[in-house]
Image (spheres, grey):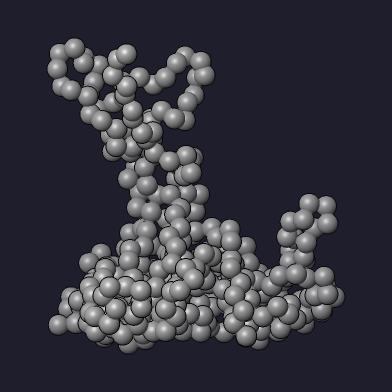
Amino acid sequence: MGLKINRPRRGSMGVYPRKRASDIVPRVRTWPDPNLGKPSLLGFAAYKVGMLHAVVVEDRQTSPLFGKEVVKAATVLEAPPLRVIAARLYTLDPTNGYRKAVGEVWAPEVPKDVYRAVKTLPEKFDLEAELKRIEAVKGMAVDVRAIVATQPRLAGIGKKTPEILEIPIGGVPSVEDRLKFALDMLGKEVRISDVFSAGQLVDVLAITRGKGWQGVIKRFGVKILPRWHKHRKGHRRTGTIGPQSPALMFTQPRPGQMGFHQRTEYNKRILKIGNNPAEINPKGGWPHYGLVKSDFLVLSGSVPGVQKRLVVLRHPVRPPPKAPTSAPQLVWLSVQI
């Protein structure tokens, strides 16, 4: 018998198709709804600022370093308040079981910057007529969601056009309580401290850094062929692309788009939430970002995407059973000199 060759497959089928994301705003397919005891948004949006390292006191009792200071990589996100511009009701379609919008109420006055993103909005809304329409269909509603607009003017990214997101309202089982909360918040701002708190775990969703069209060496990490005269058809390529039939084999690495994909990272712990930019701004500002000018948060670990990229935060969909929930003891951040 000859030598048995064992080679692991290259790349994961779980992230196919490897193409560019359709929108720079992440699409959230699952919104966990914990019992909070009060109505609240189930997510938030922030802009990535940069990374630093933080010295914190380890508070996991099962850790060998429990009670000692440890150094962790951390990411800073700027989270200017979200403006609630509309509330939307959903019911279940009896034919297919999907959610179906049955009515929505818009705030009487929508910020002018919203018209940069949605140019077809009317200038004024008849609030009384919309409330009557909502009152007629609220009995069949199963879900209430808030349509919110980011406020990049308040951040340090030099941008005016807001992103428009739809975030569910949860925290309580009653649909009436959720709807009342949504109507009360029309036209008002929601801050990051109203949704999350320090010590809490969150999932982050973002679009990764785009790298364009790349070959199989960088895209999949395949082995570079020896550079000698008999390999006359190239070295940074695969030895074979498979049989003639079937014509397409996903198990074979091929060149193509790399990066600018939507990715989700789970269970990032919030180390700090603050509203004083002087605590987080280094001298000269953040590279490729500028100065933080509004609310911010510090997350443990890394976050997909480049500076100024929009990041969506939500409650954890698979939280660990024994994770600490209290605010960590933050000793030092590397921007504090």
Which residue is rendered at x = 47% and y = 39% of the image?
13
Counting from the top left corner in percent of width and height, residue 103 is at 75, 69
In which quarter of the view is residue 328 placed?
Answer: bottom left
- Left or right of 90? Residue 50 is left
Which residue is rendered at x = 36% and y = 42% of the image?
258
- Asked if one can make out residue 225 in the rendered structure from this viewpoint, the answer is yes
Counting from the top left corner in percent of width and height, residue 237 is at 29, 26
Pick the quarter of the image with the N terminus: top left
Numbered label tally: 0
Toward the viewer: 297 or 213?
297
Counting from the top left corner in percent of width and height, residue 194 is at 51, 84
Which residue is rendered at x = 74% and y = 63% of the image?
101
Which residue is rendered at x = 62% and y = 79% of the image?
35
- Asked if one can make out residue 183 in the rendered structure from this viewpoint, the answer is no
Q: Is residue 337 above or below residue 207?
A: below
Pick the quarter of the image with the C terminus: bottom left
In which quarter of the view is residue 303 placed?
Answer: bottom left
Counting from the top left corner in percent of width and height, residue 21 is at 47, 49
Toward the viewer: 282 or 243?
243
- Left or right of 255? Residue 177 is right
Q: Is residue 216 above or below residue 161?
A: above
Toward the viewer: 120 or 45?
45
